[in-house]
Image: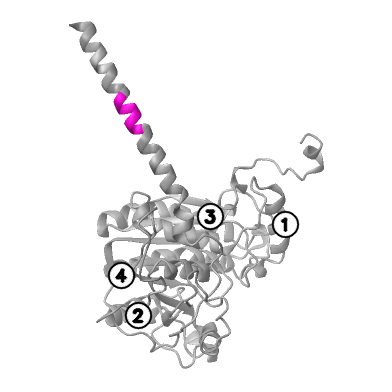
């Protein structure tokens, strides 16, 4: 009996292994088709706009944004965000990671709301209305990304009581109201009821060009406030209106864990704090609201904001030469990753730092260094 039983178990195990292998192969085949489902290639840009402060309509009928075609292929694993609403904080032009994330989410069917820094609001809305961003608003299916509403936002201030008098009277803030984090969340709740996705795509370090040893206390704290605590504040105020099963993401940088000379003013410290907070917020938001929290560590991009560092082109060149994958890092790739992370396909991923940098974070040596180049 014992040999027979053993043989039976072995045959059963063999069948299970074959079955598992077949399932694995099927899964791999399905995963290989994800790019097709996403519309592989870069997200170009988009049409219809709805950009001003009174632009969107509430969700009483059909959802205002449907940037994907009505029919989807039944094959593959499509990222489908139809029926979801996203609030993206930190979009002020059409060439940063925030914009790319908005396009990726729109391409997957999400309704897009954005929060724009108050001093940049008028220029951003004017550019949208005049069609200056139309080329970069094009989505893979040929339609244009529609931004349902643009909210004024300054994430450095949690509530009206926190705003100093000199900011209240500053002409750059004239004509705008309800732009603190608390007020923005209240407006979104009033006008749309709830959101499913929260994206933090903003950072600022007033002394970023200064070495850490030359950074003032106020400059250091300003970097922490604008670049990391702002994420805590956004999630704190938006969590009550986020639907269970939703997701939040932020953007970080490898300077959080490795020395990047020239990336100063406390910005490296702010990114380290952001990554640490991601883990804690994942636990708290997960237990409190069933919300997932992740951050994307993106490689260098020549955006307008990044140019404040002063040598961003050198950083991009270094990344290209030394990363395992020698190819240009496009903002759209980060957008695609964000779409995956907020989708049901990533339903068990939270508290993670996801690297999207062509693998540069894995390198311990610079292969273009004269010291090691002769060995390669």
Q: In this view, does 50 lie above or below 26?
A: below
What residue is pinned by disc 2?
A: 64
Cα–Cα span, label 4 and label 1 = 40 Å
Position of residue 120 in the picture relative to residue 163 (left or right): right
State the predominant SS element of the stretch in magenta. Answer: helix
- Which region of the structure is painted magenta? 15-20
Please rate how many residues cluster around mark 1, counting C-alpha atoms within 10 Å: few if below 14, some from 14 to 19, many from 20: few
Crowding at mark 2 (Cα within 10 Å: few <14, some 14-19, many 20+): some
Per the model, the C-alpha gap separating discs 4 and 2 is 10 Å
Please count the marks in the image. 4
Instruction: Give the number of the mark in front: 1 or 2.
Output: 2
The residue indicated by pointer 3 is: 297
Q: Which residue is drawn at 47% across and 51% down?
A: 353
Residue name at image x 32 percent, y 22 percent: 14
Distance from Cα at disc 3 to Cα at disc 2: 31 Å
On the question of residue 29 being in view, the answer is yes
> Camera-side residue: 370 or 163?
370
**Residue identified by numbered label 4:** 83
Name the residue located 26 percent from the left edge and 54 percent from the top edge.
287
Q: In which quarter of the image is residue 81?
A: bottom left
Taking 11 as reference, is 98 left or right? right
Q: In which quarter of the image is the C terminus?
A: top right
- The span from disc 3 to disc 4 (Cα, nearest Å) is 28 Å
Indicate which disc residue 194 carries.
none
Question: Helix or strand or loop: what does disc 4 sit on?
Answer: loop
| Viewer-side label of 1, 3 | 1
Lower sequence index among marks 3 and 2: 2
Helix, strand or loop at mark 3: strand
Depth check, mark 3 against mark 4: the one in front is 4
Residue 358's place in the image compared with 246, above or below, is above
Of 86 and 135, nearer the camera is 135
Q: Residue tagged by mark 1?
A: 317
């Amino acid at each position: 009996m014992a040999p027979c039983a053993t043989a039976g178990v072995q045959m059963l195990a063999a069948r299970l292994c074959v079955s598992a292998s077949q399932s694995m192969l099927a899964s791999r085949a399905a995963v290989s088709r994800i790019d097709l489902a996403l519309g592989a290639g870069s997200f170009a840009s988009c049409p219809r706009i709805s950009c001003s402060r009174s632009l969107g309509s509430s969700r009483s009928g059909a959802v205002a944004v449907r940037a994907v075609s009505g029919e989807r292929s039944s094959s593959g694993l499509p990222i489908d965000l139809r029926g979801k609403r996203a609030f993206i904080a930190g979009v002020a032009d059409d060439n940063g990671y925030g914009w790319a994330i908005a396009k990726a989410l729109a391409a997957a069917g999400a309704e897009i709301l954005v929060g724009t820094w108050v001093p940049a609001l008028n220029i951003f809305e004017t550019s949208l209305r005049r069609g200056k961003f139309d080329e970069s608003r094009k989505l893979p299916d040929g339609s244009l990304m529609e931004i349902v509403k643009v909210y004024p936002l300054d994430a450095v201030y949690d509530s009206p009581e926190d705003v100093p008098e000199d900011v209240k009277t500053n002409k750059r803030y004239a004509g705008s109201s309800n732009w603190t984090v608390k007020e923005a969340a209240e407006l979104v709740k009033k006008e749309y009821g709830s959101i499913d996705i929260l994206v933090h795509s903003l950072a600022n370090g007033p002394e970023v060009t200064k070495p850490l040893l030359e950074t003032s206390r106020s400059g250091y704290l300003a970097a922490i406030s604008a670049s990391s605590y702002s994420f805590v504040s956004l999630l704190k105020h938006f969590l009550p209106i986020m639907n269970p099963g939703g997701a939040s993401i932020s953007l970080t940088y490898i300077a959080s864990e490795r020395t990047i000379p020239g990336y100063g003013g406390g910005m490296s410290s702010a990114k380290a704090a952001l990554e640490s907070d991601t883990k804690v917020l994942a636990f708290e938001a997960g237990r409190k609201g069933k919300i997932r929290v992740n951050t994307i560590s993106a490689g260098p991009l020549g955006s307008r904001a990044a140019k404040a560092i002063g040598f961003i082109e050198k950083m991009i060149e270094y990344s290209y030469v030394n990363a395992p994958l020698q190819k240009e890092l496009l903002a759209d790739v980060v957008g695609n990753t964000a779409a995956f992370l907020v989708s049901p396909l990533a339903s068990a991923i939270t508290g993670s730092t996801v690297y999207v940098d062509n693998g540069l974070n894995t390198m311990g040596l610079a292969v273009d260094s004269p010291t090691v180049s002769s060995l390669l």
